[in-house]
Amino acid sequence: MNRILIGNAVVGQSGGPTSAINATLSGVIRGVSENRADGKIQTLFGMRNGIEGLLRDDLIDLTSFFDCEEKYRLLEQTPAAALGSCRLKMPEPGADPAFYERLIHLFEKRNIRYFFYIGGNDSMDTVLKLTKYLKTASYQMSVIGIPKTIDNDLMGTDHTPGYGSAAKYIAVTVQEILRDCAVYRIPAVTIVELMGRDAGWLTAASALGRKITGSEPDLVYLPERIFEMERFLKDVREALSRHPNVVITVSEGLRFADGHYVGEGRQSGATDVFGHAYLAGTGKVLESAVKNAIGCKVRSIELNLPQRCAAHLASAVDLSESVTIGKDAVRAATGGVTGEMMVMDRVDAPEYTVAFGHRAIGDIANKVRKVEDRFINAAGNHVTDACVDYLLPLIQGEPEILYKNGLPEHLIF
């Protein structure tokens, strides 16, 4: 940017929500409030339902709304996206001039000079396209992507806000399932299906009990490895030969060698606007396979939405980092940064710590960060100690949650 921008800012949330996405939103609002003295940002508006809300000119004045610390605290412990979300796929710059002209008109109308978008892979695609278009337009504005996804699959950052809380929920819930399954001596297999279309970070978190309680699933299958049904059944038989209560965790995105999803046969084949297949049913497919081939008692469990909305089990580290990255996004933007995504780099130090920064959105958008080979065992049916060591710091700490009559309080606009 060649000059200091003075005007208003807008922030939106997009894609699947998390237990920490509102903490990041709180960080952006806090950042604007703390930096208002420099005069660069007067008012922060919130887009209802992401870019779709912007196109409807459906905005809320967040600067006026957040007038006390209690509102910030409530927002930070509220699950899901307080501003609402969307999955709108923006056209390529040049393909639909009227679309981008409409955006510029709306920015000019409210003198928006700072654009913050909190989201995952598809949301960073929005940041990339807007950044590309502005390079050809006369309107000057800072565009900053702020990472969010429980999938932990964004490139350029050590991990993503929202993942630590989802990992904590999964680790806790799988530990409870292990306790429950151990009460009987009847041979039984329990298959737990976890989210993760292209990356197995969430499923990997199911093994975190290894270094805490000494208990973990017998088998862990990630989409980073080709799934073979006969090998799976062989693994199950071997596990049953060791003890009667076998627990297995699997990613929803497991695929066969031909590229088809294991659970694809239970779906309609429909995809979303970004071309992603709707997935569910992997656990059920494997449940049927075990029942038919082995004949023991078997059940499947799909944890589903609680993985991303169980704010009562949030990681304090995750929430703290989420607030900080939101605040740092404001500092970066008012300092002249544009066309970049905020990131966290793990510092090589005795105690876990991260450094906050930003990287070019073109190096991040539309790419997938998969679980590293060093984190998966040679057999492809579990994770390594190195994986557990990487994940453990991300689930630490329990936030002080405000309750009312026995239930956590939530902030709803």
Image (cartoon, rainbow, N blue to C red):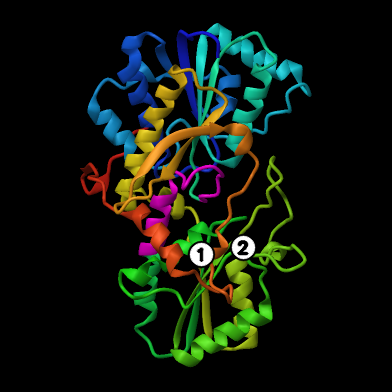
Magenta-drawn segment: 151-172
Residue 335 seen from this side: yes
Query: Of marks 2 and 1, which one's residue comes earlier in the chain?
Result: 2
* Image coords of residue 317 (percent x, y): 32, 47
> On the rendered image, what quadrant is the N terminus found in?
top right
**Label 1: which secondary element:** helix
- Name the residue tied to disc 1: 375
* Image coords of residue 33 (percent x, y): 32, 19
**Mark 2 belongs to which amino acid?**
Pro
Looking at the image, the residue that sits furthest to the bottom is: 241
Going 63% across and 16% down the picture, which residue do you hit? Answer: 103
> On the rendered image, what quadrant is the C terminus found in?
top left
**Mark 1 belongs to which amino acid?**
Phe
* Image coords of residue 64 (percent x, y): 34, 16
Q: Which mark is residue 223?
A: 2
Residue 87 seen from this side: no
Q: Is residue 68 left or right of residue 100?
A: left
